[in-house]
Amino acid sequence: MKIGWGRKEITPPEPAALAGQFYERIARETRDPLMATALALEGADGEQAVLVSCDLIAIEKHVQIGVRERVRQIVPELDPSAILLNATHTHTAPYTYSESLWIPLFWTRQPPEAMTPETYASFAIGRIAEAVAEAWTSRSAGAISRGEGHAALGYNRRVLYDDGTASMYGKLDATHFYGFEGPEDHRVDMLFTWDRSGELTGVVVNAACPAQINEGDRRVSADYFGEVRHLIRDRWQRDVHVLGIIGAAGDQAPFDLIRRRYSQLSVDDELRSAARKLVGTMEDAFEQARLGREDTPVFRHKIQEVELPLRMVPKVEAEYALEEWEKFCKRCESEEEPSAYFQSLGFERQNELLQAWSVQNRYKQLQRMKFFRFEMHTLRIGEATLVTNPFELFTAYGLQLRARSAAKMTLVSQLTCDSGGYLPTAEAVVSGGYSTQLFNGLVGPEGGRLLVEYTLQSIQELWDRPEGDGQ
């Protein structure tokens, strides 16, 4: 197998609006750099794949397309469809979009001194393409191996009450507090890469925990992955690449809600603590991985288009939502600063209005299309598989994939190649609350169940295919 690594900084060179909150944040400072890290893989039969981890909140489709088009020009021998971008979901990176299929962005303004989302997206696309080109042109004979571990990074953030309702980051000291709605997954799966001489060159690390400890900051930051890179440089004293992949973590937060109420840790302390956990897990798995190196693993890469049904909206509900939305719009017309008025309403009322917009907008969408279509990648690398989806996928789906997979190790890569919003479970939709509503995503539990089955079928096909049989 030929292996190559590349990385480029994607920190905005000018002030920029940060994505991830319902209020405006203009970053004029940088806590730590944003990076795009690329791993190029080429099998003995010419099979190709380039994994790219980006310190962004999501991968919008136009960014994925833009990177492929740019790479096509500078590395013509690389199949652009083999490039798959994933996002670490940091909430301290700029917007790459000004419109969304499922949520309005009317609370954002465009300060004259700040980069527009389009300008930043163009900048990031160029840098990401450079990282891909660097990885591809630097590839050489090497080996790859698996490593496994555990790290308590992600915790369920949907607080459940005894009346059956749930709330993201809900009150814990309420008398009707019942527990947390869904599971957690502290498994960490890793792929280690080695050069011809047996030196470690990089680690792919897959954890079901979004990189959003520092989610309310007004500085640019890669969140805990920035600290992971810093810690590895200090501890390992060598240039080892780290490619972060967020597993199924749509209902997870990178902190323990119960203990955080009384914690004296600063955000910087929390970031460093998360990094120590993850790097410690990588170090524990190092010896296991060193002994299991393979230089000619089975390597297959399957790309397919998947379509999942859009969440439906009854006509009567759409008509009511349209009335509510029009009332809000009329009120905004009388406000000198409509975005400031929206931000003054509070989170619950904001959610109601966003839901109203999404319901009436979805009803219109359904007249044109019934499905959300996206590309899904399935890779077999020895006895490991990597599977992708474009959602903030609830953890229960990831557990189903891991448990039923034909592979010995299953890496789940959410927020990859496109952006489809949250994909909640049926139980979560019944409980309600943020992350389960129509304005939170395009697809519901019916689509989630189909996604699991389609993914498992795709994995099985790679294991059933005779060795040496190409894509």
Image: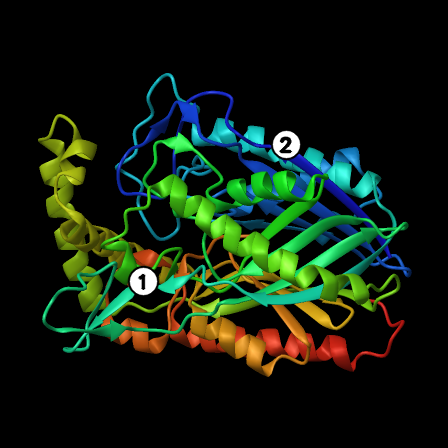
Residue 29 shown left or right of residue 6 in the figure: left
Q: How many marks?
A: 2
Q: Residue at x 37, y 68 (%)?
A: 424
- Percent across and percent down for residue 21 are 31, 43
Q: Residue at x 51, y 55 (%)?
A: 277
Q: Is residue 369 above or below residue 212?
A: below
Q: Is residue 260 above or below residue 113?
A: below
Q: Residue at x 21, y 61 (%)?
A: 170
Q: Is residue 324 above or below residue 234?
A: below
* Type of colouring: rainbow
Kind of element beneath mark 2: helix
Q: Report the front residue among 367 and 462.
A: 462
- Local packing at callout 1 (Cα closer than 10 Å; few below 14, some 14-19, many 20+) is many
Residue 58 shown left or right of residue 149 in the figure: left
Residue 286 shown left or right of residue 46 in the figure: left
Q: Is residue 153 above or below residue 325?
A: below
Compare marks 2 and 1 and give the one earlier in the sequence.
2
- Percent across and percent down for residue 7 are 67, 37
| Quadrant (top left, top right, bottom left, bottom right) of the N terminus | bottom right
Q: Which residue is mark 2?
A: 127
Q: Quadrant of residue 269?
A: top left
Looking at the picture, which amino acid does disc 1 mark?
Arg
Residue 378 shown left or right of residue 463 in the figure: left
- Local packing at callout 2 (Cα closer than 10 Å; few below 14, some 14-19, many 20+) is many
| Quadrant (top left, top right, bottom left, bottom right) of the C terminus | bottom right
Q: Report the front residue among 97 and 300.
A: 300
Looking at the picture, which amino acid does disc 2 mark?
Arg
* Distance of label 2 from label 1 (alpha carbons): 34 Å
Kind of element beneath mark 1: loop
Is residue 314 visible in the rendered image? The answer is yes
Q: Which residue is mark 1?
A: 157
Q: Nearer the viewer, mark 2 or mark 1?
A: 1
